[in-house]
Amino acid sequence: CAEAHFKLGSYYYEKKIGNLFNRKRNMFKHFLAAAEQGYPRAQYILALLYGDKGGAESVHKYTFWLRCAQLNGEPAAISFLN
């Protein structure tokens, strides 16, 4: 369920569960699972996480997920890209 993955990713993001290493890995895993299922907010947050990471591959993933979020109607992505 995309919403469940998003909520788990949010818990890791908000540092409510897990140690630092596991938290980052699990946060990405759950946001990615939700994003791949078309959850717009997860796509937007995943884009921001890749944007913070840096590097050429991360820039490509940042752009991809930000555009997906925009196309799926995420208000923050729409206003950011406009």
Image (tube, rainbow, N blue to C red):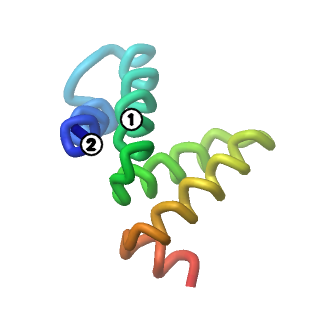
Which residue is located at x 35 percent, y 42 percent?
Answer: 34
Q: Residues within 10 Å of mark 1 (few under 14, many from 20)?
A: many
Q: Mark 1 or mark 2: which comes first in sequence?
A: 2
Q: Amino acid at mark 1?
A: Ala
The quadrant holding residue 6 is top left
**Label number found at residue 24:** none
Q: Position of residue 78 (x, y in %)?
A: 47, 77
Spatial CA distance of label 1 from label 2 is 7 Å
Q: Amino acid at mark 2?
A: Ala
Q: Position of residue 5 (x, y in %)?
A: 27, 35
Which residue of the protein is positioned furthest toward the bottom in this rendering? 82
With respect to residue 11, does 70 lie above or below?
below
Residue highlighted by disc 2: 2
Which residue is located at x 80 percent, y 43 percent?
Answer: 56
With respect to residue 59, does 20 lie above or below?
above
Which residue is located at x 37 percent, y 45 percent?
Answer: 37
Q: Position of residue 75 (x, y in %)?
A: 37, 75
- Which image quarter is the N terminus in? top left
